Image (tube, rainbow, N blue to C red):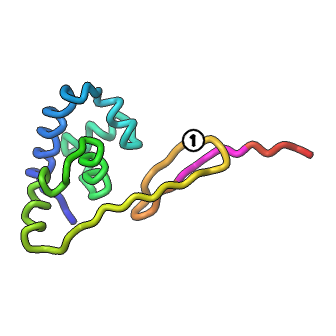
Amino acid sequence: MEFTEKDREALYHTWMSHKSKMRLTQMEFAKKLGMNQLTFSQLLRGEQPLNMSFVSQFCRFLRLEPNQVVPSLQENSASGPVVVYLQSRMSVDGEIQNAYIDGNQVVVEYAHVVKPE
């Protein structure tokens, strides 16, 4: 799904109205989303394209339903299929160094200590 400028504006206004209520900084929220502050800012300003993963996480952390915030999803929910948001968790045997999204995959890089015998 491609998001429009209206969708981006809706997310931006949602962020601006909720950040002070929740007492969150942009840096704290970006960290919750698993990205740096610059990437978060670029997404909200339209310098990077929005994707469903970002929109879902953004709304989930603000305790909102995406189809109540994003105009394109409001239009689709009236006549289209129902979207179900799922969550998966995993544990690793080490310290997570980095995590990022690559298409429909989550890549987790972690350090595992191997002790010599």
Q: Main secondary structure of the magenta part?
A: strand
In this view of the protein, which residue sits in the foreground, 75 or 47? 75
Residue 21: give x, y in percent of width and height.
19, 28
Q: Quadrant of residue 82?
A: bottom left
x 17%, y 58%: residue = 3
Q: In the rendered image of this protein, does residue 29 appear above or below residue 50?
A: above
x 34%, y 29%: residue = 27
| Left or right, 106 with reference to 97 | left
Q: Quadrant of residue 115?
A: top right
Q: Quadrant of residue 51?
A: bottom left
In the rendered image, which residue does mark 1 sit on? 97
x 24%, y 29%: residue = 22
Please rate how many residues cluster around mark 1, counting C-alpha atoms within 10 Å: few if below 14, some from 14 to 19, many from 20.
few
Tell whether position 55 is magenta. Answer: no
Q: How many marks?
A: 1
x 27%, y 53%: residue = 56
| Left or right, 26 with reference to 36 | left
User: What secondary structure is found at the residue carrying circle 1?
Assistant: strand
Residue 78: give x, y in percent of width and height.
7, 68
Which residue lies most toward the front here?
63
Residue 105: give x, y in percent of width and height.
45, 62
| Left or right, 13 with reference to 96 | left
Please, what is the three-letter code of the amino acid marked with disc 1? Gln
Residue interval drawn in magenta: 108-112
| Left or right, 116 with reference to 105 | right
The N terminus lies in quadrant: bottom left
